[in-house]
Amino acid sequence: MSERLFIRLGKTADHPCSWLVWSEQEQEIIASGELPDALSLNSLTARVGNRPVDVLVPAASMTLTKIAVPEKGQRQALKALPFMLEESIASDVDNMHFVVGTRHGDNVNVVAVEHQQMQLWLTWLMDAGLKAKRIVPDCLALPLEQCRWAIMSFGDEYLLRTGEGSGVSLPKTWTELALPKLVAEAQKSAAIEQTIDVACYSEGVTFNANHITLSPKPLELPMMVLAKGILNAPVNLLSGAYKPKREYSKHLMLWRNAAIMMVAVLVLALVNKGLAISQLNHQTAAMKIQSEAIFKSVAPSINRIVDIRSQINSQLRSMQGQGGGVAFFEMLDGLKPAFSSVPQLKPTSLRFDANRNELRMQVVADNYAQLDKFKEIVSKDFQLDGGAMNSNEDSVTSTLTLRSK
């Protein structure tokens, strides 16, 4: 996303809120302005779209300090951080949100802000439908630009960054009183009296304090300067209890439709496979019944079929062992012309006597003429003994005994 929305909130809902939309790709301001209060933030909802939202909050609403924490045992020391700062913070440490910043030697920068204030800012954003990616104290967004300090005029106050992770927000009326003290503390911590280079982002900034040199920087909108610096800010107040949860669901939504289609295709494939298997099972069952019926007609002495394949093989071996297996199949092959000439005539049972080399079969036809024609054709190749013929309303049955000539 090449465009970003930057918002600077006030301490209370009545304070104005500045905003700016910056295009990283075009390196230009798309839009900017100032809202009269926090309730007007919802006017930015349509403008933000899917842009990331970076939020600045006034340093005057919190305490930026540093504390000595030896690197050895640092983890245990940081857990006790609220109690270590208890005497230097006026508020109850149990009601404070602490964020650890950068380290310089044994000194660690710390930001302390009341939970009530954090919740107030987050409520304003949530009510406006805005979700912050980061929340940064405004003074820490001032670029140092290879200087020790940085300063900018913002309304009736100065934003002053006094180090990588430290800074203050000074009312302009307090500058002459507070600035010398800040300079003295900086020189004391550095253990040398040296001039402090200050990157200046506003015109008309003048100080009577000694040991300060202002280095003018290109003049831009105050929100533009802060927008450029916030991306490299050393702290993000959205940490600990306020750290945003990862939005897995948003990424999953991108794949939801594809996943639904894949599941639907899989279900349809399984249903189709199930129907095919069911149909094959029905066909297999029907063929089994038909095969058993044919086998029983050929081998009526077998009453119970357990494994039809092995029983057929056994029956064939038995017939071949008696010397009649080949004769049986030769007789069946010799009957093919007769059955082809009289297709209306059907055998209902077959019985072969291997000892007598005799085939007895019961047949059914539509009328006597069909039966006579069948006998006439068969008698050319076989000795034929015709049994009694029985008739009913729509068919004629007879038992025929055939022997090879």
Image: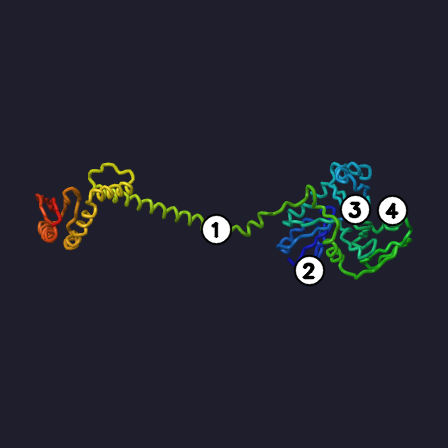
Instruction: Check whether the beta carbons of the residues at disc 2 and disc 3 lie within 8 A of each other.
Output: no
Q: How crowded is mark 3: few (under 14 residues within 10 Å), some or many (20 or more)?
A: some
**Residue at numbered disc 3:** 103
Point 81% across, 44% down: residue: 107
Residue type of the residue flagged with mark 4: Ser
Q: Can you tell which of label 2 and label 1 is closer to the viewer?
A: 1
Residue 239 lies left or right of residue 277; in this view the side is right
Q: Where is residue 7 in the image (x, y as percent from the top left)?
A: 70, 53
Residue type of the residue flagged with mark 1: Met
What whole-number distance in Å separates the C-alpha atoms at marks 3 and 1?
52 Å
Residue sitting farthest toward the bottom: 26
The quarter of the picture where the N terminus appears is bottom right
Point 79% across, 61% down: residue: 219
Residue type of the residue flagged with mark 2: Glu
**Residue at numbered disc 1:** 262
Q: How crowded is mark 4: few (under 14 residues within 10 Å), some or many (20 or more)?
A: few
Secondary structure beneath disc 2? loop
Dividing the picture into quadrants, the one containing residue 122 is top right
Q: Nearer the viewer, residue 183 or 258?
A: 258
Secondary structure beneath disc 1? helix
* 89 to 154, vertically: above or below: above
Secondary structure beneath disc 4? helix
* 85 to 329, vertically: above or below: above
The chosen color scheme is rainbow
What whole-number distance in Å separates the C-alpha atoms at marks 4 and 1?
65 Å
**Residue at numbered disc 4:** 189
Residue type of the residue flagged with mark 3: Arg
Q: Compare marks 3 and 1 and give the one earlier in the sequence.
A: 3
Q: Compare marks 4 and 2 and give the one earlier in the sequence.
A: 2
**Residue at numbered disc 2:** 24
Q: Position of residue 214 (x, y in %)?
A: 86, 57
Q: Compare marks 4 and 1 and give the one earlier in the sequence.
A: 4
